[in-house]
Image (spheres, helix red, strand yellow):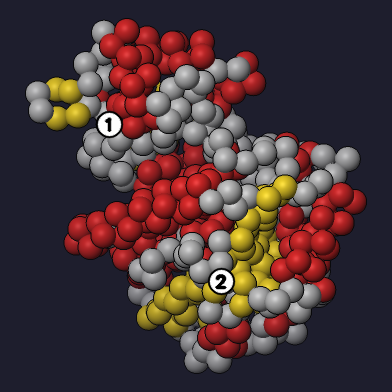
Amino acid sequence: MPTLPPFGDRMPGMDLRGLEKTVRMAAVAVSRADDVLIVSHIDADGISAAAIAATVCERLDKDYDVLFFSKMGEDAIAAVNNSSRSLVWISDLGSGYLSQLSKDGIVITDHHVPDSSWRRGQTSLGEFNRVIHVNPHDHGYDGSSEISGAGVTYLVAKSIDPANTDLACLAVVGACGDMQDSGNGLSGINRTILEDAVYEGGLEVKEDVRLYGRETRPLIGFLQYGSDPEVPGLFNDQEACSAFYAGLGIPLKKGNRNRCWTDLSENERGAAAEALLERVKEKDRAKLVGETYVLTDFPKGTDRRDAKEFATLLNSCGRYDDAPTGMRICMGDEDAVEASKENRSAHKRNISGAIDLVKKNDLLKVRRFIQYFDAGGEIKDTVLGIVAGMLLSGDGAYRGLPIIAFADSDDGVKVSARAERGMAERGLNLSEVMKKAASMVGGFGGGHNVAAGATIPGDRKEEFLDIVEDLVSAQVI
């Protein structure tokens, strides 16, 4: 890989020195803390970030606790403000709620759009509430595509001790979990982190077919369920997939064992990749074949060897109230891998069941500027965003419209919003839409430009949709 400048390519408006300064300030605060409470999100990015922060605390011989939350709601805010620890380190959460945090001694390493009502002057030790806020958006970088929460947390870890570059692999997993590798691979600050991971020797970048399941899915399932991009004539067609391999003379089994994509020889993979490229549209070729990230410290055929599959493993823990197991996996606990198997099975069942529910019951409704579905209590609210994203990238929705998804949750209605990245180039910012629309109906929201969420009262959904549509129509060119 080519040598890259620190924190990715410089562009007009990017405040490199400001970001580096804030990273160093956070590193000093963590190093000086007597003890630490780590608060993080439950998704793959948040779990990876928490594992990085926890490993740093262990290496500094600091006493620490870890709490995971699905959102920065009242419980999370109370846990932060009422903590007796000398420092609270919030990762992959917090930026949207800065004005609600009052504890003396907080470090935030996040990549979501910051709370616009917060006074940036607080980002220095000894001033106001001593909140040290490390966020790429404050320095001209795009937190939705150039760096994840785990990536920001990694920058602080590396600043504390260069030996912590061995944690770069976890930051890559976090970025893949937030789909920041969409397109043809990681970019921006992620690129520098990727270079660290390669230099440390725990990760290899290989050009290959980028469909999900390279290490663990049998060959037919690899093509049958591969949806980003869909391969015409093969997606959702088991017989066609079998015929595809037969036509290339590629056996599906070795003995009694199903072969996976990474079991193929270099010649077999090359022939299959070339045949697949001939089937997809020109615009999808860069998405189909490109960079893949192989975690070389893990055995072949396991879901920890491929960064995207590792991220799904972590999501399967976090979405089923078992984020600590995911963190243990990141920190090298082999017993945790065994403990996570039921989570993985439940995750796969729930995702496929939820997508079938939406399709078979025609739940998806289309308005002029948005599309939406209301799953009520039929879909687990913690997987709602994944379902919405998969519908949008598969054959279940219109790719040119943002998708808004509703599911019942304990504190109201959970909303997940997703859109293709091309819509951001046309002016769409779902973070702003969710935040404003939710506040107008008595809820709260935020996130990224093409992936955001909210929680709203259960009786305000129609009003919320009207507001969202108005805001989207005003943004999109």
Q: In this view, does 101 lie above or below 185?
A: below
Could you say where residue 51 lies in the image, as x and y percent from the top left?
A: 40, 63
User: CA gap, disc 1 to disc 2?
Assistant: 35 Å
Circle 2 residues within 10 Å: few <14, some 14–19, many ≥20: many
In the drawing, does residue 199 fall left or right of residue 87? Answer: left
Q: To which quarter of the image does residue 439 belong? A: bottom right
In terms of secondary structure, where does tag 1 sit? Answer: loop
Image location (x, y in percent) of residue 306:
36, 39
Q: Where is mark 1, residue-wise?
A: 218
Identify the residue under disc 2.
Answer: 408
Relative image position of residue 274 (x, y in whole percent): 44, 11
Task: Work out whether residue 16 can be spotted.
Answer: no
Q: Report x, y in % for residue 260.
A: 27, 29
Kind of element beneath mark 2: strand
Viewer-nearest residue: 165 or 142: 142
Q: Quadrant of the C terminus?
A: top right
Which amino acid is tagged 1?
A: Pro
At x 70%, y 64%, the residue is: 446
Between disc 1 and disc 2, the foreground one is: 2
Identify the residue at image location x=60%, y=68%.
414
Number of on-image labels: 2
**Is residue 135 rendered to the left or right of residue 44?**
right
Locate residue 190: give its quadrant: top right
In the image shown, does 19 or 235 lie closer to the viewer?
Answer: 235
Extreme-left residue of the structure: 255
| Amino acid tagged 2 | Asp
Badge 1 crowding class, 10 Å Cα cut-off, few under 14, some 14 to 19, many 20 or more, is: many
Disc nearer the start of the sequence (1/2): 1
